[in-house]
Amino acid sequence: MSLKTLAAALLLAALPAFGQTSDDTLYRQLGGQDGLVRLMDDFMQRLLADRRMQPFFKDVNQQHVKEQLVAQFCEVSGGPCKLNGPDMKRVHENLDIARADFNALVEVLQLAMDAQGIPFGAQNRLLAQLAPMHRDIVNVK
Ligand code: HEM
């Protein structure tokens, strides 16, 4: 085998690794697709049972919101998904969401993640991805 052929063979062998652009560790710690579906089912139940969150979620298309959240959490955790939907500012713009509401939702999400046995470090890494979104979501004082 010539040096050129060898170099080409090595490059081809390495291609799948190049294609893997993102680290999916967090996605796997969240339980992958099945884990995220379970997490969102439980999260939505908890949102509806929480007197602070219930007014926001009781009349929405809960199935749709869960599916969008699964896609979004999959994407931000390095999984093989892309959220297709309006941006976070548009989704939440008519909802009058205060910082306290945002914090309450995060608290409920933490309880849901605990219930799924998601490791604390993974929870924190996910929350670190979501936290900056408050700038687009919180829209009242
Ligand atoms: C990091 C925090 C949050 C994230 C990542 C998030 C993400 C999302 C996503 C992906 C959707 C579905 C959008 C679509 O239909 O395509 C959604 C919808 C919704 N979110 Fe959030 N959200 C967050 C915080 C909040 C907070 C704090 C509230 C209120 C307390 C809230 C209330 C809602 C409601 C009511 C909908 C349904 C809107 C509708 O269908 O009319 N969200 N959110």
Image: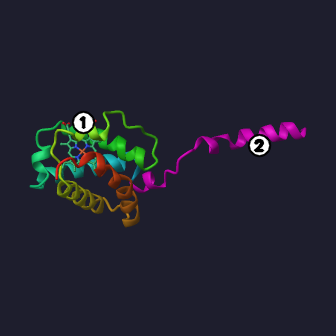
Q: Vertical placement of 114 versus 36: above or below?
A: below
Q: Which residue is mark 1?
A: 64
Residue at image location 40% in from the left, 59% down from the top? 125
How far is the residue under mark 1 from the one under mark 2? 45 Å
- Please indicate whether residue 71 sits to the left or right of residue 141 in the image: right
Q: Is mark 1 within 8 Å of ligand 1?
A: yes
The residue where tag 2 is placed is: 10
| Residue displayed at 84% across by 36% down | 5
- Start-end of magenta stretch: 1-30
Tally of numbered tags: 2
Magenta run includes residue 47: no
Q: Find residue 63 and report its horizontal and vertical position in percent.
A: 22, 38
Helix, strand or loop for the magenta stretch, by majority:
helix
- Residue 41: x %, y % from top left: 24, 47
Name the image quarter holding the N terminus. top right
Q: Earlier in the sequence, mark 1 or mark 2?
A: 2
| SS for dot 2 | helix
* Residue 124: quadrant of the picture: bottom left
Is 7 magenta? The answer is yes
